[in-house]
Image (cartoon, grey):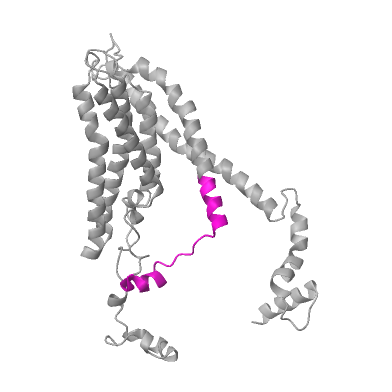
Amino acid sequence: MSQTRLVDVPPAQRFMKFDRIDWNRVFFKTYYEKRSAAHLLVNFNRVWILHVAFFWYYTAFNSPTIYRRSNGAEPTPAMVWSATALGGAVATLIMIAATIAEFAYIPTTWNNTSHLTRRLGFLIICLFLTAAPTIYVATQNTPRNQSQVALVIAIVQFFISLVVTLVFCIIPSGRMFGDRVAGRARKYLASQTFTASYPDLDKKSRFASVMLWVLILGCKLVESYFFLTLSFKDPIRALVGMRIQNCEDAWFGDALCQHQAAFTLAIMYVMDLLLFFLDTFLWYVVWNAVYSILRSFALGLSLWTPWADIYTRLPKRIYAKLLATKDMEVQYKPKASLHRLVLHKQLH
């Protein structure tokens, strides 16, 4: 059977030839069936980028005290733009880590690794574009010698960084350079039919899904900035550089207690990031409830309909949707039809 195509066999005989098919030549193995903690990075990399990168944008912009110079001088506007733009480098590093981890889950064939290698090279270029300008701005731009060139470079770096982050958030990593399986090559025809056959949403459902996430993330990003990050600005300014004096511990002396402010600030950053994640769930619950209510009214249901009425109307709804067809020669009443249906199930 290895020299004969299955489509050349008469349809009535194809099922009997399944045991002679060379399955290794039909399908391409693209993933190993194994699960590990690294899947949290590979499968949910866009979730990490959406939260960690945007948290960096917000926090870096409102924490200029942290990256001020050693002499106490406030950072220049170019340095603020450039430090904020490092959020794109954070997003790129997450993508690089996810790509490297993905190598462990695919067979080491050129058909698979070439796609990841090409993506990894693209990510390295993105990392250079989003991180390298910060080195120039930090070394060449000082409060005494502020350069307009450095400011322009920092602003361009920020917008490149923002575009890179949005692309990584929207486009799945597997489709970043085109979906190979969805192409027209005949070698992927079997995968398109079996392992990679996914139903598409119609335009109306797809628009509803996109708008749901636009509302969730839009409200989340606006609310998180004003109520989580902006309110954190003053504590950062107060705690950065603070050192506790005249403190003593029996075991560690003053090595820990004098840095208590730094420990407190680090814990506050971690807690703020956790709340940044939880904010997404909060707005998901809110907008999902709104969508559910609107969907119920669109289907002709009411939130105030008693459960007793729903169960009372259930036989008529089953009859109208399943049993009463135009092809039936005899039309039964709902109760009689349901009685026949239940009796049929019991007999079989």
Q: Quadrant of residue 346?
A: bottom right
- Residue name at image x 79 percent, y 72 percent: 335
Can see residue 121? yes
Closest to the observer, 177 or 267: 177
Q: Residue 133 at x, y = what percent?
A: 23, 32
Could you say which quadrant of the image residue 203 lies in? bottom right
Q: Position of residue 67 (x, y in %)?
A: 28, 22
- Picture quadrant of residue 3: bottom left
Q: Nearer the viewer, residue 285 or 132?
A: 132
Q: Is residue 283 above or below residue 330?
A: above
| Residue at 72 percent of width and 54 percent of height | 301
> Which one is in front, 312 or 13?
13
Q: Is residue 83 visible?
A: no
User: Is the residue 119 above or below the residue 237 in the image?
Assistant: below
| Side of 221 relative to 346 (left or right) | left
The percent coordinates of residue 319 (x first, y second) are 74, 71
Q: Residue at x 41, y 86 (%)?
A: 15
What range is drawn magenta here?
185-213
Of residue 82 and residue 57, the one placed in the foreground of this image is: 82
Give the x, y percent position of residue 229.
Answer: 43, 27
Quadrant where the N terminus is found in the figure: bottom left
Quadrant location, the C terminus: bottom right
Q: Is residue 194 magenta?
A: yes
Up/down of 40 relative to 286, above or below: below
Please name the predominant secondary structure of the magenta segment in the image: helix
Q: Residue furthest right?
A: 333
Q: Tell me the residue at 73%/66% (across/down).
A: 317
